[in-house]
Image (cartoon, helix red, strand yellow):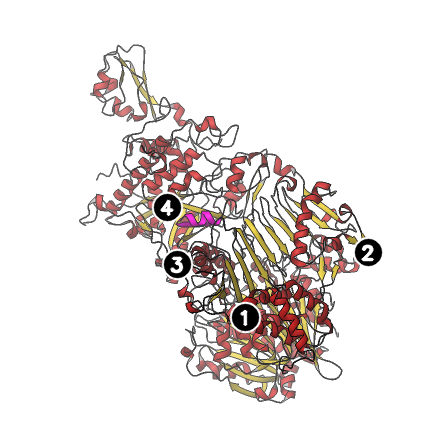
Amino acid sequence: MNSKGYFADRLIAARIRDLVQTDHGANVKREDEGGCGVTGFASTIPLAGRHIFEPSIRMHNRGNGKGGGIAAVGFDPDRLGVSREVLDSHYLLNIALLEPSCLDALKEDFITPFFDIAHEETLDHITDYRELDGLEVKPPDVWRGFIRVKPDVLKTFIQRHGLGGMKQGWAEDEFVSRNSVALNRRFYSSLGEKQAFVLSHGKNLMILKIVGYAENVVKYYKLDDFPAHIWIAHQRYPTRGRVWHPGGAHPFIGLNEALVHNGDFANYHAVCDYLRQRGIFPQFMTDTEVSVLLFDLWNRVYGYPLEVIIEALAPTGELDFDLLPPDKQELYDVIQSTHIHTSPDGPWFFIVARNIPEENKLQLLGITDTSMLRPQVFSIYDGEAQIGLLCSEKQAIDATLKSISSEDNRFSPVADRYWNARGGSSSDGGAFLFDLSPNSEGKICLTCRDKFGSIVEIEKRKPLNIGETLVKPSDSELLNNELLALLRNKRPKELFRLFQNRASSWDYNTLRWTISQIGKHARRDRELLFPAIESLTILLDRKIPLGDKKRSALVRLVHDELNTIFRSIPPITETLKLGYVTRIDYNTRGALRPPLAIEKALIVDACDFEPEGDDCDSVLLADAYKLGWRNFVVFDLRGQRFEGCGLGPMTDGVKIDLYGSSGDYVGSGIDGMEINIHGNAQDQIGQIMKRGTVVIYGDVGQCFMYGAKGGSVYVLGNAAGRPLINAAGKPRVVINGTALDFLAESFMAGDPLNGGGFVIVNGLTLNEDGVISFLPKPYPGSNLFSLASGGALYVRDPYRQMVEEQLNGGIFAELSVDDWLLIHPYLIENEKHFGIKVNDLLTVDGELRKPNEVYRKVMAVPLSVLTQIPSTDDSVWDSDGAAA
Amino acid sequence: MSYKNIWSQAPSAEVVNTPTRFGRALGKYAVIVSDACNNCLRCVAICPENVFHTQGSKLAVPRDHLCLGMECSRKTNRCVSNCPQNAIRVGYNSSSQALGDSRWTPELLMSAWHMAETGQLPKSDIEYRVGATEGGFDKLRFRFPKKPPKRDIDVESIDTSISLNKRHDGRHEISIPIPVYGGGMSFGSISQTTMLSRIRAFAAWGSFTCTGEGGYPEALYPFDDHIITQVATGLFGVKEETIQRVKIVEFKYAQGAKPGLGGHLLGSKVTEAVARIRETVPGSSLFSPFPFHSVYSVEDHKKHVDWIKAINTKALVSVKVSTPSDVDMVAIGSYYAGAHIVHLDGSYGGTGAAPDVAKKNIAMPIEYAIPKVHNFLVNEGVRDQVTLIASGGIRTAYDIAKAIALGADGVVTGTPELVALECIRCHNCESGRGCARGIATTDLELVALMDLAWGTQRIINLLSCWRDQLRQILYKLGLSSIKELVGKTEVLSHLDYSSNVQDDDMRVAGK
C-alpha cells in the first residue's frame, strides 16, 4: 500500500465516476502549433527571473510572440510573504483570471469550501501592459493562494473513493488536482467565453503565461528580481492568428511539475483516447498538455519510477534495445508493449521542472524523442555555484550564462560541458536531469544524471574568480619580454607552445595577466595585431594542460580578450585611421565600402545584428564580398545564422572566421571559401555545400551537411543526429568524435576511390587538458549508412567494436592501400587543424599499428530494391520528383 | 556579322496556326473517301472547316480532325449529301476513342490539340471543359446568368493578371498576365526540347516555369527571369548560383500525388548529363527523402525560408505542399514563415510513379483543400498577403476558373502543356526508350521527333486560348478582373447537390 500504483484502479475509477456525466467534447486538437523555443536552468543559488530573458530573446525566431510562459520552482518564502513551513507544506495555487470579476464566484465554488488559505494575494504587475514592447493583449490578473485541503473535506474524499490507507499527502495531491480540473471545466473549457483557469497548483512551483514573448511574463509580473532555483521558459509559435488569451501557452502542469515542449506528435488522438479511458480529459487541446497529463498519470497514479516514465515516452529502439542488460530488456519490453499507442510519436523535446517534496528535491529534466528530431543542448557548469542548463540552441545557454555571470562571479559565461542526448539509446536514454537537493551539511548541490541514473561527472577544478584584482606576477618582466619577442617575430604557434608548456603551473592570476598582456600589445602596436589574434585563437581552438584550472575559465578569458582586441580596431567610419583591418558593427553597417589601400580584413562586430533577415550579418558579409572584401572575422556572435551564405559561386580565396555562438546554416551552399568556426557549431551547417573547407573547433549540431555535394569539413568533436544525410557527390569529412544516429543515411557519394566522397570517424574524445582517449565504441548507434548507394565510411575501430547490426545497407570491407592513400592526406590536414597526430590515431595499446588494423571501411552494397525496377511499375514520368 | 541565337529568346505570344507534326491528326470523327471519288473537288469548295484539300489536282487525305461531325456532313449543302459519287462517309473515329483515360478523355485530348493548333476552341461538339471522372472539377459547373450582368465590359479589356508578391516587402513585385505558371518537371523526366518549349511559351506570356528537382541546365539561363527554381527534399542540383539566378524559389515539401513519400532515381538512369546537373556521381542511385531532414516544425520551416532569403535577397518564396487534412495550418504556417506563394498540390495530377495507395488514400481532394485554406486565411486576416496557387489535375480553362472561384489566385499546370505537344496519355513514359512521341524522354532519336519552335508555338496557342476562355467566363459572370472571381463559390454548382444546372458551354450559350 506504500506504492503509488496500488491505488491506480481506484483513482481512475473515481475520476471516471465523477466525470462521466459531463460532456467533454471531441478530442479535437484546437491549438495546433509547429515548434517553439524552450529553455531552462537549475541553479544551486536562486537566480532572478531576468536571467530567463536573454535566452528567451535569443529565441524570438522560434516563437511568434503569440504565447509565452515561464515556470519557476524553489522559492525564497520571504519573497512570497509566507513562512518556510507554509511554502513547503502548502499548495501554491495560481489562477489566471481572464475575466477578473469571476473571482468571487470562483472562490465560492472551488476554494473556500474545500481549502484553508494560509495566504492569498492578487499578483502585482506593471500598470500598463502597453509599456512593454510587443505586448498587445493584456495579460491575465493572477490570484494566488497558499492552500491546504480542509481535513474533514479530505477525509470525506478518501472515504468516498476508497482511498483509505493511502498516504495522506497523495490523497491531498489528488484532491487538488481534481479540483483544478473541475475549476477549469467550469470556468474555461466548457465556456465559449473563457473566464479563468488554473495556471499551477504544485508546491513551491508557479507558472505564468501571457499572449506575447516569454520575457514579458517576467517584466509584466515584476519578476525581474524574483529569485528561484529553477526557471523554464517557452516561446510559442502558434500558427493560428488571433490569440486573445494565454490558455494554450506553455508550460502545462501535472501536479508538482511544469512541462514545456518543442515539437508535436502524430498520435495525439490515440494518446487522448488512452487518457480518456483513465478519466482524464484534456482541456486545453494541445500536445503539450497531453504530454504532461501522461507524465502525471504515470508518475502519480501508476507510480512509475522516472526511468520507466522516460522509457514510456521515448522507447529504446533497435540495436540499442539489444545492447541493454537482459533484465532491463525484460522490463522495457513490457513498458513498450503497454505503451505502444501512447508513446508520443513525432518530433519533440520536453523540458520538465519538478518539485519532489517527498524526496526534498527540485529537478530539471530534459527528454528527447527517440529519433532526436528537435534540437537540444545540455550543459553544466560546476564552480563555486553549480548550474545545469538545457535549451533548443546553444546560444540560448550562452546568453543565460552571460547574463548570470555578469552579475555574479560565482558563475561563468562558459560552461564546463555542452552535450546532446542520444534519444532512445542504451547509452544515456535520451534524457538528462539536474537534481537540486541539500547535502549532509544542508548545502544545496546539483547532480546531473542520465536516464539510467549514471552521474555526469565534471572534473573538480578550481573555479576562476573574475572579481579578483589582477596583479603583476613575480616574473612579469621576463614573461612580457618573451611574449613581445614572439609577437614581434610573428610566431603565434610558439607563443601557443609557451602556454602549452607553462600554463599548468601558473595560477589564474598569471594566466589572466599573460592573456591580457597579449591583448595590450595587440592594441598598442598594429604590427602585433595579427600574431596576437592568431595566438589567442589557437588557445581557443586547441586544449592545453591547465593543471588545477578550468578549461572554461581559459575560454572565457581568451574570448573576452579577443573581443576587447577586436573592439579596439578603428571603425569603418574613421577612414583616417586606415590599417590592415577595419571594424564594422550594426550601427555603422551603412558605411560599408570597398576595401581601401592596405585593408585586408573586415572585422564584423556581430553583437547587435539580427539572427536572420535583411539585418543579419550574413547579408552584410555577402554585400561586402561583392564590394571586394575577401577576409572576414565575425566576433561576439549570438546565434546569428547563415554566415557564408549568399556569396554565390566560386568563392575561392574567401576566408571567414567566426567567434562566439555561431548559429544555424553556417556555410550552407558555399562554393570554394574557407570557414573556421572557433567553438561549437549549430544545426544545418554546410547544407548543400558544394566546395570549400569548413573547420569546426568543437561539436556540430543536427543535419550537418544535409544534401552536401562536396567540400572538406573537419570536426574536432561530435556531430549530432543525421549528419551527411542525403549527401551526394564528393564531400570529404573528418569527424574526430562520434556521431549520433543516422550518420550518412542515403549517402550517394559514388566510389570514394574514384572521385566520390567519404566520412572518417575517429571516435575519440579530448579531456580538459587535451589528452586524447578513445570512446569505447567509435559509433554507438544503429542506422549507420542506411540506404546508402555510394560513398564510404572509414571508422577507427581497432577492436572491431562495430557490428553488422549497426548497418542498414552497408557492409564492412578491409581497408586497402588505396583507401589509406585516399584518407591519409585528410588525416594530415586534420592534424594541422587540431593537433591530433596521425601516429596517435594509429597507436593501439601503446603500439603503432598498420592502418588496416586500425581503420575499417564501410561501403554501400547494391540493394536489390535500388537496382531493380519494381515489377508493378506502371510509371509515367514523375511530374517533378527526383524519380524521373 | 553577328550571330543571334533565336532559341534563347522568347517569341511573341501571338497565335500562329501550328498543325500536327505527324501525318494525320487524330480527331473525333473520321472522314473516309472511297475509291469512287472522281476528284470533282466539290467537297473542297463546300466544307466550311477546310477538311478537304487538294494535292496537285487530286483530293488529298482529309483533315478529318477539323470535321464538325455527322450532323454537319449530312446537311443538304454539305459534303456527304453533295458528293456526286456518294464517296464520302463520316463516322466516329474509332482509334481516337481508345485514347486517354477518364481524367483526360479522348475529347479533352483532342480539344487541347485543337487549341494548340489553332489557338481557338474546337467548333465541333467536342467536350473541352471537363473529363469523365465523376468527381473533382468534373462535378462542378459554372452558373452563368442567362444574360450577362449589365456592366459595360469589353471582353478584350478583362484583366486576367495576378500578383505573385502580395506582401510588398521590398522583394520583386511580380505580376503575371495570365493566372497560370508551369509546374516543375525535372530535367531527365522530360526532354530538353519539351522543357524549353514550356519555358519559352510561358516566358512569351510573361509567366514562369518551375525547373523541378533535377537541377538547372545551362540552356535555361537565357530565361532566368521566367524560371522558378525548386528546392526539394533531395536538394539535388540546388546551388547558390541557381537560387541567385531566379526571381522565385519554390520549396517542395510534398507532392500532391504522393504525399509523405520520397522518390528514387535508379543508378542506371544517373547518366553523365543527369549527374552533372544534379551534382552527383554517375551510376550512384539517388533518393529524395520524404521530408526535409532539417525541417520538422514551423520554426525550422521559417529558418529554411530565411536561409533562401539570405542567399537571394530579392527572390519571392513559394511553398509547395500537398493537401493533408490540416492543410490550413500548413498554409498559415507558411505565411508566418515568410512565404509569398502558398502552392497547394492536389492528388489528381500526373504521375503514375506514385503508388496508388498513396494517391488514392492520403490527403484531401484539391477542390476541398482550396476553399478550406482560402477561408482560413480570410478569417485570419492575412488572405490579402498571400498568393494562393492550386495545382494537381488542372486540365482546362474551366478547371482554372473553377480553382479560382473556389479561392485560389491562380494555378500551376503541367500535363496540359504535354498534351499540347501531342501527348496521347499512353502512360508509357518510362518503358523502353521512353516516350514514343519524344516528349518525356532523353533518348536522342526520340527527342528529335519534336522541333523547339513547333513545341513553343503549340503551348503559346493553348495558353492564348485559355486566356480567351477565361475572359469569356469572366464576361459571362459580369466580372472585369480575374481577381474578382477569387473565392466566389456562388458561381459554381456541384452536380451531385443541385439539379437543373444549365450547360456552361460558352459556345452554346452565345456571346
Nearer mark to the viewer, of 4 and 2: 2
Q: Which residue is mark 4?
A: B225
Q: Which residue is mark 2?
A: A846
Q: Is residue B379 magenta?
A: no
Q: Which residue is mark 3?
A: B377
Instruction: Give the letter of the chain under mark 4.
Output: B
- Helix, strand or loop at disc 1? loop
Q: Indicate which disc residue A384 carries.
A: none
Structural crowding at the residue carrying mark 3, measured as other residues with C-alpha within 10 Å and reported as few (<14), some (14–19) or many (≥20): many
How far apart are the alpha carbons under marks 1 and 3? 61 Å
Residue drawn at (28%, 13%), measured in percent from left and top? Answer: B87
* Left or right, B126 with reference to A651: left
Structural crowding at the residue carrying mark 1, measured as other residues with C-alpha within 10 Å and reported as few (<14), some (14–19) or many (≥20): few
Disc 4 with disc 1 on a shared chain: no
How far apart are the alpha carbons under marks 2 and 1? 47 Å
- Helix, strand or loop at disc 4? helix
How far apart are the alpha carbons under marks 4 and 1? 52 Å
| Residue B225 in picture, x, y percent from top left | 37, 46
Q: Is residue A268 above or below residue B24?
A: below
How far apart are the alpha carbons under marks 4 and 3? 29 Å
Q: Which residue is mark 1?
A: A525
Nearer the observer, B340 or A847 = A847
**Residue type marked 3:** Leu
